[in-house]
Amino acid sequence: MTAVAVTGLGVVSPFGAGVKAYWDGLAAGVCAIRPVTGIDADGFRCRIAAEVPDGVGGSARRSRADRLALAAAREALDDAGLARRERADAALVVGAVGGGMLEAEAWYWERHRRRIRATRALRAIFPSSHAEVVGSVLGLGGPRETVVAACSSGAAALALAADLVADGTSPVALAGGVDALTRICFMGFNALKLLDPEPCRPFDRDRRGMSVGEGAAFVVLERADRARARGARVWAELAGHGATTDAYHVTAPHPEGEGMARAMRAALAAAGVGPGAVGYVNAHGTATSQNDRIEAQAIRAVFGEGRLLVSSTKSMIGHTMAAAGALEAVATVLALAHELIPPTANLSVPDPAVAFDCVPRVAREAAVELAISNSFGFGGQNVTLCFRRA
Amino acid sequence: MSRVVVTGVGVLGGAVAGGSDAVRAFLARAPGAPTPRAVPAATLSALLDEGEARRLSRACQLTVGAARLALADAGLGPGGDLGLVVGTEFGDLRSTIEFVDGYLRRGPGGLSPLLFPSTVMNTMAAAAAIAVTAREVSLTLCAPTVAGELAVARATALVRAGRAPAVLAGGMDQLDPLLLEALAELGGGGDARAEGAGFVVLEALDAARARGARVLGEVAGAAWRALPARPYGVGRRPASPGALAAALAEAGVAPGGVGSVQLSAAGDALRDRWERTLVEAALGAHGPRTQALGPIVGRHSGLAALAIAAAAADAAAAGAPALVHAVARGGSQVCLVVSGP
């Protein structure tokens, strides 16, 4: 694969707007999972989530998710130092699930009480809205795509964008993921009994499920030689990626993690490295009993036991759905750049079935050359991104 | 980089349901009048097993059915080396509404854990991947009115780059009364719409030849771009060359060498006029013959498969490549250059 450099980062997370706030929170091991304020949680077993604090900004006429996406996308482009004229050929790939559903839900709830007409907010209901808004406002004229791959959407967006850069279709690409907390998401995971009433505890022996969150993250990808030529700061190299499908069950992962392991192996193969070269895994790590056990099994199948550092940043910002893969990619890039592995917060009693050092509660200094970020979604959709330190 | 060929077509709609033979027969009838907009129950159930008929939502059933038709047409059984790219504009909206209605009627106790996964748009791809054992990359691409064409363009790139030896690509959309009401009130109701699904099987030419597959056509160029336009609006004549020029350049085809164009026009007057302007700008005002299947069979994201089959047939008959072109409000534009077998 042609070397693809990460030259810009942008984040809106439950720690607030900006990459700095995000990294400060992760590095300090702060858990941003709190009682839900944005939607009505009455009657549900779980009433907590990791919400983006108020004050994101942007026009109130846009959906919350569109505003999250715009803020993160702007920061990434500014961070990369791309002027508007340099964006005309830029590709845009957005991982999305909920779209503008939060506002559509409000309309539908009201319509349930009394007959009302459709509102303009419904135009932004579908996931493709984010790419339409971000692309139009920021003047991105290259290939535009919205990929929906459930909880691996954000990672899939980075993988697709990397291909567009590597094959020469676009000189530069903006890629990321976004999701605002919606009633449907909150209610759905409650209905599946997959939410922990307390902040989630990935890889803990006593874990009881996930916590949901919201946010957005974007990265700027460009050919490494182009980045060097224009003197851009390179955060890391996106060295390879792998995407596979379990073809097993709509909601449950393959019981042996076969598809997960295949995605990790494919990413390593694309990067041209063996498992021994990787020092850190930013795990999907949802804190459901099934995911963490099977993911650990798959990691062990690829890397062997023990040596790796494995952590789940969902322990701090919750599971941000379509944004998760992109937020975790940024966390992985920052871990390489800062030589600091973010911890797994709330991890008190490590699960003996997880044969790794899961960096409990406190970040760990470690100079790692290569790291991977795992994202797995409903539908058995597995994506692994492999990053190399710049 | 591999050359990419079409080895199978599967279309499931009210107008036509079947593989390349059924599509050929339908196109030969030179349809002009609008056709039925819903898939007959018997047609759909014949493509599903008992469990799928009972368990899957209609959106998933349509997707699984069309995927099976395309694979059978390509002479491929269910297999692990298959990728999948599903384009959709609306996803499984009906299941989403049903899920929400459960809550509004009965509170948290009314929520169905079985329906929740269908509120995520990749549910159709998940069901199809399981049904046909597609274990390579699986993508769902959401886009207004160009999703099917975009799925085929992206799948072409995946096969070309060797990311999967064969990819099922196309799309599905389903109609819902609430959706039609909202589209009408918000000004997007001009398009003739239908429910349906359609896929093509794309393979690397070498792989297709090695297994003795019948080749229906070649995707010689595939490009997608964003033209300057406000969200939900249309643009003017583009300042940038756009997907048309990029696809032609990739295929090595001069504008004057194009034999015909399949348009995405389906009744949205503003967008349809814009599309004609774009095509004329790229190919000339007195350019090749154009056809739009949308007004006849109704627009859905699976229509791309039918358009590609029509383009391949046109290209074979005329001895000149044909284009499949689509543009959406908001500026997404896709162009495929299809040559005959």
Image (spheres, coloured by chain):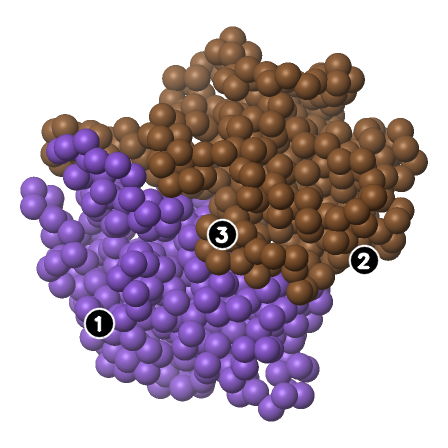
Q: Residue at x 68, y 64 (%)?
A: B240
Q: Is residue B279 visible?
A: yes
Q: Which chain does the purple colour mark? A: A
Mark count:
3
Q: Which mark is residue B233?
A: 3
Q: Which chain does the brown colour mark? A: B
Residue A280: image location, x then y, percent: 43, 73
Circle 2 marks a residue in which chain?
Answer: B
Q: Which mark is residue A55?
A: 1
For badge 1, the amino acid type reads: Gly
Q: Is residue A290 visible?
A: no
Residue, far left = A42
SS of the residue at dot 1? loop
- In the picture of the structure, the residue carrying the numbered disc 2 is B249
> Tags 3 and 1 in contact by the CB under 8 Å rule?
no
Residue B11: image location, x then y, percent: 63, 24
